[in-house]
Image (cartoon, rainbow, N blue to C red):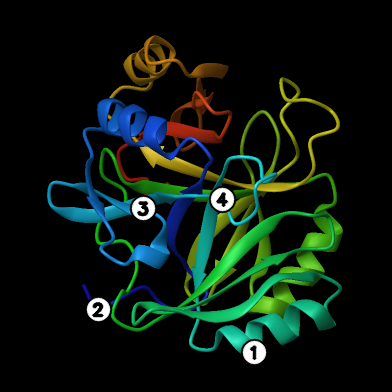
Amino acid sequence: MSGVEPGTPCWTDLATPGLADAKRFYPELFGWTGRVSPEPAAGGYTVFLKDGRAVAAAGPPAAPDQVPIWSTYVATDDADLVATRVEAAGGQVVVAPFDVFDQGRMAVLSDPAGAVFSVWQPMAMRGAELFNAPGAMCWNELVTSDPEGARDFYALVFGWHAEEQPTQPAPYTGWRCGARIVAGMTPPLEELPADLPAYWSVWFAVADAEATAARAAELGGTVLVPPRDTPRGRLAALRDPEGALFSVLTLRPGHTG
């Protein structure tokens, strides 16, 4: 794989204090195998593989009080430039750009509504090696109650253009980067807590959303939103045993998230 185009989600990882539990839960749920980083400073950072290809990872949190969270990484040619744009657009640099060994350069950032995301400037590690297949990331979505602010912010930071898509029961916003819709935006689900701040959600493709949701519950997770039909396929919103939110999607034919 030659890597993902700049401005496109390219990787996801889980920061969690329950790393040992994550290394049990997700392989049993998605059929992943784990490859632990040999670098002592990586703190047991584990890359998950599906059919031998990297799809996601999990590692310890950056701070002891950090809540467990799946992060969306957007590919870039210049992490430092993106961090500068984020500040200029009213966002926050949560973690300033830094090199991750010889793998790449990253930064952790947030938009003005508090949605946290990361950028990845690839070196040895290009990003995920599999997308839109069962057990792999298939979509990334900004959940926010401030869509107008998000439109301005992400246009300045990544050059994205928000496009309304005529879907039912409500219109849906896609983020266009060049010729492609690379991510989405939606208001918060009614089922989620009203005080939940804006966030980026990560979706994984599965062969059967019902079976995956049931299996997640058996493994100690929580089904937040039971499987439901969406324009992209059948979706369920889940939490892992430590509380990290993620979604699973049985893709409709012809859809890639």
For the residues labelled 3 and 4, the Cα–Cα distance comes to 11 Å
- Amino acid tagged 4: Pro
Q: Position of residue 43 (x, y in %)?
A: 41, 56
Q: Residue furthest front?
A: 40
For the residues labelled 3 and 1, the Cα–Cα distance comes to 30 Å
- Dot 2 crowding, Cα within 10 Å, few <14, some 14–19, many 20+: few
In this rendering, the label closer to the viewer, 2 or 3: 3
**Residue at 85% across, 51% down:** 146
In this rendering, the label closer to the viewer, 2 or 1: 1
Report which residue position mark 4 lands on.
61
For the residues labelled 1 and 4, the Cα–Cα distance comes to 25 Å
**Label annotation for residue 81:** 1
Circles 2 and 3 in contact, beta carbons < 8 Å: no
Q: Is residue 143 left or right of residue 134?
A: right
**Residue at 26% across, 44% down:** 133
Circle 3 SS class? loop
Q: Is residue 10 above or below residue 141?
A: below
Circles 3 and 1 in contact, beta carbons < 8 Å: no
Circles 3 and 4 in contact, beta carbons < 8 Å: no
Lower sequence index among marks 3 and 4 = 3
Report which residue position mark 3 lands on.
44
Total marks shown come to 4
**Label annotation for residue 2:** 2
Lower sequence index among marks 2 and 1 = 2
- Amino acid tagged 3: Gly
**Residue at 38% across, 79% down:** 101
- Amino acid tagged 1: Leu
